[in-house]
Amino acid sequence: MMKYNFYQPTKVLFGAGRFHELGECLKTMNLGKKAAIVISNGKSARENGTLEQTKEQLAKSGIENAVFDKVEANPTASTIMEGADFVKKNQCEFIVALGGGSVMDAAKMIAIMATNPGDVWDYAFGGHGGNKNYFEKPMPVVAITTTAGTGSEVDAWGVVNNEKYDEKIGIGGADASHPVLAIVDPELMKTVPSEFTAYQGFDALFHSTECYITSPANCMSDMFALTAIENIGRYLARAVKNGNDLEAREHVAFANTLSGHVMELSACSSEHSMEHAMSAMHPDLPHGAGLIMISLEYYTWFINRHVCDERFIRMAKALGREDAAKPMDFVEALLELQKACKVDELKMSDYGIKPEEFPEMARKAKDTMGGLYAADRTELSVEETIGIYQRSFR
């Protein structure tokens, strides 16, 4: 019997040039007269001009702004609380997230903490989280994604790293946590460096591959997932090779947003839990890079359990292996794509990860985001998680 829930309140403006419609769109939305623009602690938004253009778009609608520029690549709980305090002190009425997945995740968490009491970790389920539901409606968020990796522009979750406990957990999930508006303009993604284009593209890919093989998968999520996988398979290597290839950027961005929808319809797997533990303990590790490092051994483990052989074959075909006849064809197709994107030689050791950390890492993976382990079609134990880390190590 098929069951699924799908509620998508986010208005999406997709396509090249849609960023320039922000001001006119905001005029009709009546979100308020002052916005907090949330950006990363890097230089890209200022150097590529998108921050100034965003300010201009807001001004067209008579909206003032204040800029919060503290978000890390792996957003921390302390930064979320600092951002919430900034929003309240500046009397902002809504938030504009300008950046990639980290910025959008942080903005959604800041929006929650701007209207709810306590600490953000009070609302985390797992690890040292307080296991509380928030009851006050979050501040509205407008998501302008400048990367194609997380699908955060259309989902209700934000991933936060608690530096005190080295825990990384997704928080949110309520209907009101969705951004009210998402702008997905591939022209904003042309300046993303090739290596990060690859990392982000594989993150988007794994959102769909994971959701396709977990137990909550359904006909609706399958439709979105396979289309996303096809678009990544055909266009990601092109986008990595030539960032100015707008057609490739457009299709990868499309796959990314679809993968955001897929996560709302199904559930990611323990692969994401495993990587969150890696980058919680090593915050300099890009999320997508960590996923790539463990992916071949991770999917091989599940293939050897024969829990959904036909699904792996269908994913292999979606990645371009049209003659796929066995589940391992998917792993081979995945490796081919990693080679084409020049990310097949990534090493955990380059980010300071050591084999002696794997037992703690595995326990954190299952303890902090055990819900994703529960979505797997067959149980992956802590010991088997350690084994996947070990076989992936270089």
Image (cartoon, grey):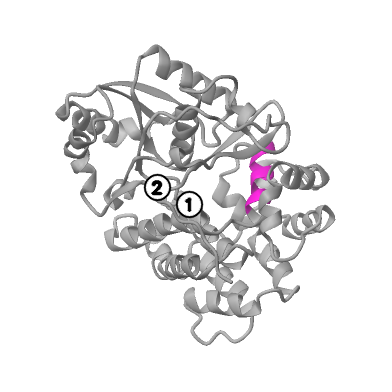
- Give the class, few, some or many, for how many residues have Cα within 10 Å of label 2's Cα (few <14, many ≥20): many
Q: Compare marks 2 and 1 and give the one earlier in the sequence.
A: 2
Which quadrant is the C terminus positioned in?
A: bottom right
Image height of 196 relative to 59, above or below: below
Residue 353, position as x, y percentages in the image: 72, 44
Residue located beneath label 2 in the image: 147
Residue 55, position as x, y percentages in the image: 24, 28
Instruction: Determine contact: label 2, label 1, CB under 8 Å.
Output: yes
Q: Which mark is residue 144?
A: none
Identify the residue at horizontal 75%, vertical 74% (top origin). 304
Residue located beneath label 1 in the image: 200
Identify the residue at horizontal 64%, vertical 57% (top origin). 269
Residue 77, position as x, y percentages in the image: 58, 27
279 part of magenta stretch: yes
- Provide the major secondary structure of the magenta segment: helix
Q: How many marks?
A: 2
The segment highlighted magenta reads 272-281
